[in-house]
């Protein structure tokens, strides 16, 4: 599943991703957290570590990839926390 989601976005939006602040950046599938996940598989949820796609074997972490590099990522993270 991880490989499929990493390789098809944005051509195939198989997941309804959360809204982005000012519609900037692109959602990316990141690390896999293996373990029990009681959330509905295939849906996006948020916990204390951020957004993830629920999977029967764990969580597929999501992050936003900003085109302007690290400084924009830090700025947008700080803006969304306030």
Image (cartoon, rainbow, N blue to C red):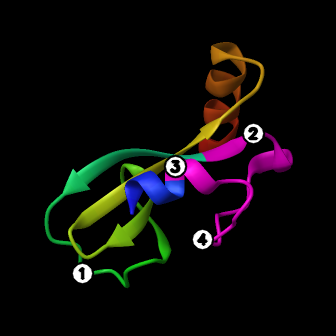
Secondary structure mostly seen in the magenta stretch: loop
Question: Which structural element holds mark 1?
Answer: loop
Is 1 left, or right, of 36 in this rendering? right
Question: Can the viewer see residue 51?
Answer: no
The region drawn magenta spans 6-27
Mark 3 touching mark 4, by CB under 8 A?
no
Q: Residues within 10 Å of mark 2 (few under 14, many from 20)?
A: some
Q: Is residue 10 magenta?
A: yes
Question: Which structural element holds mark 3?
Answer: helix
The residue carrying mark 4 is 15
Mark 1 touching mark 4, by CB under 8 A?
no
Q: How many marks?
A: 4
- Report, in whole angstroms, how far the alpha carbon at label 3 lies from the one at label 4: 12 Å
Mark 3 touching mark 1, by CB under 8 A?
no
The residue carrying mark 2 is 25
Residue 5 pos. (x, y %): 51, 58
Tell me which corner region of the image, top left, top right, bottom left or bottom right, holds residue 42.
bottom left
Residue 20 pos. (x, y %): 74, 52
Of marks 2 and 3, which one's residue comes earlier in the chain?
3
Is 54 left, or right, of 19 in this rendering? left
Residue 6 bears which disc, if any? 3
Tag nearer the camera, 4 or 2: 4
Of marks 1 and 2, which one's residue comes earlier in the chain?
2
Towards the viewer: 7 or 28:
7
């Amino acid at each position: 599943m991880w490989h499929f989601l990493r390789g098809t976005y944005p051509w195939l939006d198989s997941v309804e991703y959360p809204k982005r602040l000012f519609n900037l950046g692109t959602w990316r599938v990141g690390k896999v957290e293996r373990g029990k996940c009681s959330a509905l598989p295939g849906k996006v949820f948020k916990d204390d570590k951020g957004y993830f796609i629920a999977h029967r074997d764990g969580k597929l972490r999501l992050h936003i990839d900003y085109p302007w590099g690290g400084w924009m990522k830090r700025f947008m993270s700080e803006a969304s926390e306030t």
